[in-house]
Image (spheres, rainbow, N blue to C red):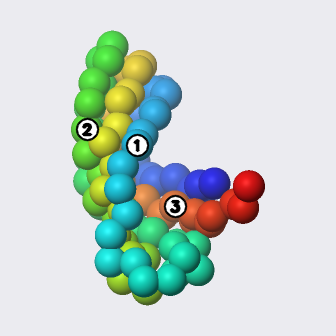
Amino acid sequence: MARGGGVLAVGHAFFAAAGCVSNITRSEDFSGTYWTTGGSAVVGQGRGVLFMENAHGVDVHLAEQARGVLMSWQIARLDMELIPD
């Protein structure tokens, strides 16, 4: 599960993302706050990448697809945690 957001955005878009996790030795190190900076521009459909790291040194690399109209520059924070089946 992930929650969070960024600042300095104009417009509205829907995002879907999938990716991989690296630099992890214990599953409990995944949960936490991840930070990233960057910008995006979407008109119609677009693709992008997102690189994040948490305080435990765990890296998350996401490939995202977006749909809508959006222009942003952001410092974003996402709180993520593993939810057991």
Residue 35, image quadrant: bottom left
Query: Can you identify the residue that label 2 sits on?
Result: 48
Q: Residues within 10 Å of mark 3 (few under 14, many from 20)?
A: some
The one of 74 and 23 positioned closer to us in this rendering: 23
Residue type, label 3: Leu
Q: Decide: marks 1, 2 in contact (CB < 8 A)?
A: no
Q: Decide: marks 2, 3 in contact (CB < 8 A)?
A: no
Front disc: 1 or 2: 1
Res. 78 mark: 3
Query: Can you identify the residue that label 1 sits on?
Result: 18
Q: Position of residue 29 (x, y in %)?
A: 52, 81
Q: Position of residue 21 (x, y in %)?
A: 37, 63
The one of 65 and 13 positioned closer to us in this rendering: 65
Q: Position of residue 27 (x, y in %)?
A: 54, 76
Q: Which residue shows up at 74% across the image and 55% down it?
A: 85
Q: Earlier in the sequence, mark 1 or mark 3?
A: 1
Give the left or right position of residue 79, taking residue 41 as reference: right
Above or below, 28 against 62 in this view is below
Location of the N terminus by quadrant is: bottom right
Above or below, 30 against 18 in this view is below
Q: Decide: marks 1, 3 in contact (CB < 8 A)?
A: no
Give the left or right position of residue 4, taking residue 58 as reference: right
Residue type, label 1: Ala
Q: Residues within 10 Å of mark 1 (few under 14, many from 20)?
A: few
Say what secondary structure mark 2 lies in: strand
Residue type, label 2: Gly
Q: Which residue shows up at 70% across the image and 60% down it?
A: 83
Res. 50 mark: none
Q: Could you tell me if residue 32 is visible in this image?
A: no
Say what secondary structure mark 3 lies in: strand
Residue 53, image quadrant: bottom left
